[in-house]
């Protein structure tokens, strides 16, 4: 009986061991297959390409050739279009403009004089004042036609309105009776307008300590041609007219009636960056 019991226990133990071993192998295969399936079914992430950042700002510098002088200016603009597509095409831009200019009377004449030492010098006959303008204006630019793609030209309408501060500087001449230089007045007008006694101009710096200021305003309108070769460059030409009005007449030439306003045509060359 004992022998049969022992044999029965051995057989039962062997059967249990085989069952456990078989279950372990099956569990291992199941886990491995599940892991492979999970790895196989895992989606592959592909990042989407990012689009170009819309243009929102512009900074540019320019030079104007006016029919009555010249000016330097700078524009800082903000794109006001509501959609990224329009912002890249610069449909609408609002900008702040700073400008410095000089006004010249079309009747000015540049004359050559002898300084008394055998040297030839230049001066402007009859000029009694230099007149400069410091301007601050608000402007807009609206696209009328074209698209700013490489190799194309876009056409815009530009308008600016703002304030002006006129700077009037006396123009000094050297004359034989007073080589230290004179400016125009009732007492000096005979020598100031006598070419026989004029030795030449006293120089650009003479008279800045006697500046006088004349407040006023300005208005300009122009057609703007944008020749930019890419979306981040600003390369343009403007053609338009300018109107300035000051609080009192501005005397520039001795033989001309002073007026408080200036009207001129201009061509401007502009370069800058957008971001």
Image (spheres, rainbow, N blue to C red):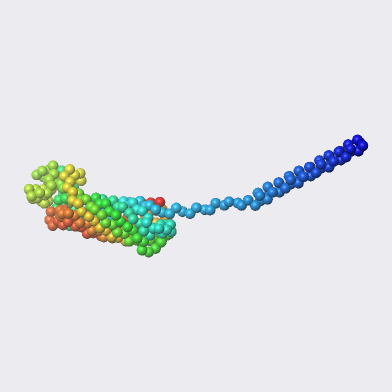
Which residue is pictured at 63% across the width and 51% down the height?
Answer: 42
Closer to us: 58 or 132 = 58
Which residue is pictured at 22% across the width and 55% down the height?
Answer: 217
- Above or below residue 153? Residue 17 is above
Hey, which residue is sitting farthest top in the picture?
A: 2
Closer to us: 235 or 215 = 215
Which residue is pictured at 71% across the width and 49% down the height?
Answer: 33
Residue 67 picture quarter: bottom left
| Camera sees residue 205 | yes
Quadrant (top left, top right, bottom left, bottom right) of the N terminus: top right
**Is residue 62 rendered to the left or right of residue 30?**
left
Residue 188 in the image, given as x and y percentages of width and height = 9, 48
Residue 230 in the image, given as x and y percentages of width and height = 42, 55
**Is residue 263 rendered to the left or right of residue 41?**
left
Hey, which residue is sitting farthest bottom in the picture?
A: 145
| Camera sees residue 206 | no
**Is residue 123 rendered to the left or right of residue 77?**
left
Residue 94 picture quarter: bottom left
Closer to us: 18 or 159 = 18
Closer to us: 199 or 240 = 240
Residue 140 in the image, given as x and y percentages of width and height = 32, 57
Residue 190 in the image, given as x and y percentages of width and height = 8, 50
- Above or below residue 128? Residue 149 is below
Which residue is pictured at 42% across the width and 58% down the height?
Answer: 83
Hey, which residue is sitting farthest left in the picture?
A: 187
């Amino acid at each position: 009986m004992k022998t049969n019991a022992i044999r029965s226990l051995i057989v039962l133990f062997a059967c249990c061991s085989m069952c456990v071993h078989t279950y372990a192998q099956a569990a291992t295969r199941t886990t491995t297959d599940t892991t492979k399936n999970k790895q196989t079914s895992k989606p592959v992430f592909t990042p989407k390409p990012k689009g170009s950042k819309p243009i929102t700002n512009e900074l540019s510098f320019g030079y104007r050739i006016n029919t009555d002088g010249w000016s330097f200016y700078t524009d800082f603009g903000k794109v006001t279009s509501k959609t990224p597509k329009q912002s890249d095409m610069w449909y609408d831009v609002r900008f702040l403009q700073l400008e410095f200019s000089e006004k010249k009377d079309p009747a000015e004449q540049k004359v050559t004089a002898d300084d008394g030492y055998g040297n030839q010098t230049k001066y402007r006959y009859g000029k009694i004042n230099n007149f400069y303008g410091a301007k601050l204006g608000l402007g807009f630019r609206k696209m009328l036609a074209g698209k700013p793609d490489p190799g194309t030209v876009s056409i815009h309408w530009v308008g600016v309105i703002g304030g002006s501060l006129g700077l009037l500087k006396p123009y000094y001449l050297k004359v034989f009776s007073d080589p230290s230089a004179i400016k125009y007045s009732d007492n000096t007008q005979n020598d100031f307008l006598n070419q026989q006694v004029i030795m030449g101009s006293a120089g650009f710096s003479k008279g800045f300590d006697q500046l006088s200021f004349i407040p006023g305003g300005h208005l300009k309108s122009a057609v703007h041609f944008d020749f930019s070769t890419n979306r981040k460059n600003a390369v343009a030409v403007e053609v338009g007219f300018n109107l300035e009005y000051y609080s009192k007449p501005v005397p520039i030439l001795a033989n001309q009636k002073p007026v408080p306003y200036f009207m001129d045509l201009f061509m401007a060359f502009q370069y800058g960056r957008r971001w």
